[in-house]
Image: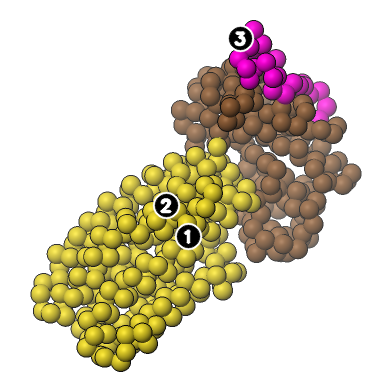
Amino acid sequence: MIATFRAIVARDLRLALRHGADTLGAVLFFILAGALFPLALGPSPELLRRMAPGVIWVCALLAALLPLDRLFGAELEDGSLDQLLLLGLPPSLVALAKMTAHWLTTGLPLLIAAMPLAVMLGLPFNTLPVLLAGLLPGTLILSLLGGMAAAIVLGARRGGVLLPLLVLPLATPGLIFGAAAVDAVRTGLPFAPDLELLLAFFAGALPLAPLAAGAGLRAAAE
Amino acid sequence: MRVEEISVFRGERLVLDGVSLAMDAGGALLLTGPNGAGKSTLLRVLAGLRKPDSGRILWHGTDAFEDRSMHARHIAYLGHQEALKPGLTLTENLSLFARGRPLAPALEAFELLELRELPARLLSAGQKRRAALARVVLADAALWLLDEPSLGLDARAVERLGEALALHRRTGGMVIATTHVPLPLPNADALALPGAPLEAVIGDAWGAGGWA
C-alpha cells in the first residue's frame, strides 16, 4: 500500500520534471506577482516592509492555485483516473498522493522562492525564520485544500472558475494566522499562538481534505 | 463471481435493466449489442468504478461494493482510453501498475520490449493499445474487463492478444470483453445487450427482466 502510494508520488514528480515549464510556472508567477507590488506602490521601504508578509502570503496562495485544475483534470481526460482508482488503494489515499506531489512540485519551490522575495520587499532578517515556519504548514494546507477542491469540481463544466471560488475562502484562516505571525515578530509580540493555530488548521485538513477528495474522485469516475 | 439483477440509469435513461450473469474460473463472456446498449457501462459497474442503481455483484459470496478498493485488486480494466502519459516512457508509464512485478513478460507478450524506452507520445495508436493491454496482463488480476480490446490492433497483435487471453484462462482467470468484431476467444459465452428499450423509459413494468 505504501509502495503504491510512493509510486504515484514518484510518477507525478517524474511527470513534473518532464514538463518543467509547467512546474516552474507557478514559482515564476509567485516571484513576478510579488515584484509588481514595489512597482505599483512606489519605493517606500517602510510601506513595503509593512505589507511584505501579506503580499507574500497572498501571492503564494494564488500561485498554488495555478497547477490545480490539471492535478486531476489531466488524469480524468486520458483515462488514468480509472486506472488509479483500480490500483487497490482507497481513493482518499490516491488523492493524498496527488496532493503530496502537488506540494513537492509547487509548495516546496514556493517556500524556497519566498526567501528572496522577502528580502526584496525589505523584511528584516529576524522575521525570515517565522515566515518560513508559517509558510511550511501554509503551503501544505494549500495543497490539501486545493487538491480537495480540484477533486470536487472534477468533471464539472467551468471547473477552473469554480476552483478558486472554493479554495480561497477556505484558505483565509491560514492567510490570517500566517501573515499575523510575521507581523508579531516585527512588532515584538509573541508569534507562537499564530503558528500554533496554523498547525491546528493543518492537523484538521490532513485527514479531512483527502477524505472529501476521495469522494470527489469516485463521483467523477462514475 | 455472480452478478444479480443490475440496473443502471444514465440521466433519465435506463441503460441496463436487470442484467444477471455468473462466471467461474477460466470462463469468458463476450458482450455484444448496438452502440449505447450499455456494454461499457456494465464493464465499469463490474470494475466497481460505477455504482449500479440496483442489483449487486457478489465475489466469492461477498458484495463487491462493500469494499471497492479490495474488489479493485481482482480487476484489470481496459477502457476506451489508453491512459498513457505522453511525456513518460513505456516503462515509466507501466511501472506504477507493476507493483513490484517484472515488466518484461507483459511487454514481451505484446512485442513491446524494443519500444520500452520510447516516450508514449511517439507511439502509434495500435502500439498504445498494446501498451494498455500489457498493463492488463501486469495487473495479475483474476478478472479482465476489456472494452473493445482489439480496437486498432493489426492481425499479428490480435494473435498475441488471443495467446494472452488463452494463457489467462488456462491459469484460472476470467475474461469479460465487449466487441463489435470477432475476438480470438474460443468457447466464450455471449451476452447480447439489446439496447435500452423505449418502453422501459416510459416505465413498462412488464418489459423488465433478465436477459442472461
Callout 1: 10 Å neighbours few (<14), some, many (20+)?
Answer: many
> Do the residues bearing badges 2 and 1 touch, measured as CB atoms within 8 Å?
yes
Q: Nearer the viewer, residue B140 or A104?
A: A104
Please give the chain letter of the residue carrying mark 2: A
Mark 3 belongs to which amino acid? Ala
Real-space Cα distance between discs 3 and 1?
47 Å
Residue B200 falls within the magenta-colored stretch: yes
Residue B125 badge? none
Q: Check disc 3 and report the residue beneath it.
A: B205
The segment highlighted magenta reads: B184-212
Q: Quadrant of residue A126?
A: bottom left
User: Which quarter of the rendering shows the N terminus of chain B?
Assistant: top right
Q: Check disc 1 and report the residue beneath it.
A: A68
- Is residue A25 shown left or right of residue B151? left
Q: Residue furthest right?
A: B155
- Residue A157, x across and y down, in percent: 54, 49
What residue do we see at 52% from left, 70% from top? A23
Mark 2 belongs to which amino acid? Ala
